[in-house]
């Protein structure tokens, strides 16, 4: 999903952008926890797109099993928390630790989204 990019967004568009941003932060934090527990996710995947999806889903399932069994991730492994201070890290720091690179903006091809603007 993409945020609305109007120069003068309506109230609904600002609310949508805010909610989308919050959802992305939750997703980035969750993936940070996965990368902390499953180090295989730190490397570039050389396999097919289908196998990459399967590997990521396997990590999610195994992570959930670990949580159910009480095997929690240590604070040192949790990328969302700074182990030195114990404070939550900001989004930019987490993105840097995850080695996420900035992506170019892609043109919006969703007809319905264009009609909203």
Image (cartoon, rainbow, N blue to C red):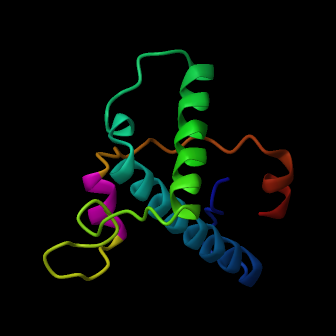
Task: Locate residue 34, reporting x and y percent.
Answer: 44, 51
Q: Residue at x 34, y 53 (%)?
A: 36
Query: Could you tell me residue 106's position as x and y percent?
Result: 57, 40
When asked about the image quadrant of residue 43, the answer is top left
Residue at the image point whose x is 67% and y is 53% from the top: 1
The image shows residue 71 at horizontal and vertical percentages of: 44, 61
Q: What secondary structure prevails in the magenta region?
A: helix
Q: Residue furthest front?
A: 69
- Range of the magenta residues? 91-97
Residue at (72%, 79%) from the top-left corner? 10
Question: Can you tell which quarter of the image residue 115 is in?
Answer: bottom right
Q: Is residue 117 above or below residue 101?
A: below
Q: Nearer the viewer, residue 28 or 33?
A: 33
Closest to the observer, 37 or 10: 37
Say whether residue 10 is left or right of residue 6: right
Locate residue 92, reporting x and y percent: 31, 64
Taking 20 as reference, is 37 above or below it? above
Where is residue 8, by image quadrant?
Answer: bottom right
Q: Is residue 99 left or right of residue 83?
A: right
Residue 16 visible: yes
Location of the C terminus (image quadrant) = bottom right
**Residue drawn at (47%, 53%) of the image:** 31
Q: Nearer the viewer, residue 10 or 48?
A: 48
- Is residue 51 inside the magenta stretch? no
As drawn, the residue found furthest toward the left would be: 84
Instruction: Tell me, yes or no, if residue 9 can be seen here.
Output: no
Q: Is residue 36 above or below residue 90?
A: above
When the figure is inspected, residue 49 is found, relative to residue 98, above or below; the finding is above
Of 109 and 58, which appears nearest the observer?
Answer: 58
Q: How many marks?
A: 0
């Amino acid at each position: 999903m993409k945020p609305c990019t109007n120069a003068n967004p309506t109230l609904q568009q600002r609310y949508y952008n805010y909610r989308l941003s919050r959802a992305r932060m939750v997703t980035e934090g969750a993936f940070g926890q996965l990368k902390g527990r499953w180090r295989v996710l730190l490397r570039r995947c050389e396999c097919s797109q289908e196998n990459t999806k399967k590997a990521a889903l396997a990590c999610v399932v195994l992570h959930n099993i670990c949580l159910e069994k009480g095997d929690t991730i240590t604070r040192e492994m949790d990328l969302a928390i700074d182990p030195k201070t114990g404070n939550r890290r900001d989004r930019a720091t987490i993105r840097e630790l995850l080695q996420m690179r900035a992506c170019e903006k892609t043109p919006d091809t969703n007809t319905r989204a264009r009609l909203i603007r």
